[in-house]
Amino acid sequence: MKNEVELRFLDALEENKGKLFRICSIYAKDEDDAKDLFQEVLVQIWKSMNTFKGGSAIGTWMFRVALNVCLRFKSKSDKNQKRLIRLDSITIQNLKNEENNEPDTQKLKALRSCIKKMKEADKAVVALYLEGMAYREISNILGLSENHVAVKIKRIKIKLSNCINEMI
């Protein structure tokens, strides 16, 4: 029989697994790395479940853990490669092709490529923003003021737009 902590973990995981995986994908260099990173995130969330005090929504707490794991992973990866690649974030308005309502793969690839080139802090902001989180929730996860998040998102959108336009 499952205990209360396990049930809470499974329920929260079911609700947030897609978003968590997409965050991992932003920090990983390929799909296999993203899967490995996602597994590490799940392990760390599970190990930390007893420390969750309920001061925020469990999903918010899970994103905080995921970002910390991803940033540690990125840091270790950079040290192993003896190079430091800084990644920033981006936002794009509409990736749908108006004619056939299919995602415009060229723009999507450019978006992913541009995100991977951005600074870590901006990358975290854009990952959460692209998941549809409110500025307040992003500020709670990252420990920034809501106004600071709004300013960062505005600047990130400009950077990403310029980067994508250069690539296309």
Image: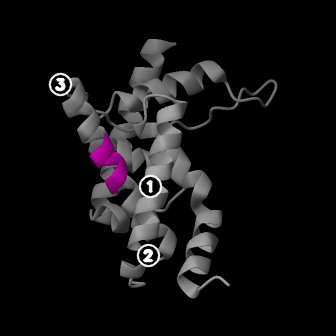
User: Badge 3, how many Cα within 10 Å: few under 14, some, many 20+?
Assistant: few
- The answer to whether one can see residue 135 in this image is no
Magenta extent: 68-73
When asked about the image quadrant of residue 31, the answer is top right
Q: Residue at x 63, y 73 (%)?
A: 11
Q: Quadrant of residue 159?
A: top left
CA–CA distance in space, label 3 to label 1: 24 Å
Q: Where is 85 relative to 10, above or below?
A: above
Q: Main secondary structure of the magenta part?
A: helix
Where is mark 2, residue-wise?
49
Percent of width and height locating residue 73:
32, 43
- Residue under the image location 41 percent in, 32 percent down: 115
| Amino acid residing under circle 1 | Val
Q: Which residue lies furthest to the front in this view?
A: 1
User: How far from the left and from the top, in percent, is residue 74?
Assistant: 30, 39
Residues at discs 2 and 3 in contact (Cβ within 8 Å)? no
Q: Can residue 100 be seen in this view?
A: yes
Where's the N terminus, which quadrant?
Answer: bottom right
Q: State left or right for residue 120 relative to residue 130.
A: left
Task: Assign a secondary structure to mark 1.
Answer: helix
Provide the residue designation for mark 1: 41
What residue type is disc 3 on?
Answer: Lys
Residue 82, numbered circle? 3
Image: 7 above or below 127: below
Image disc number at residue 121: none
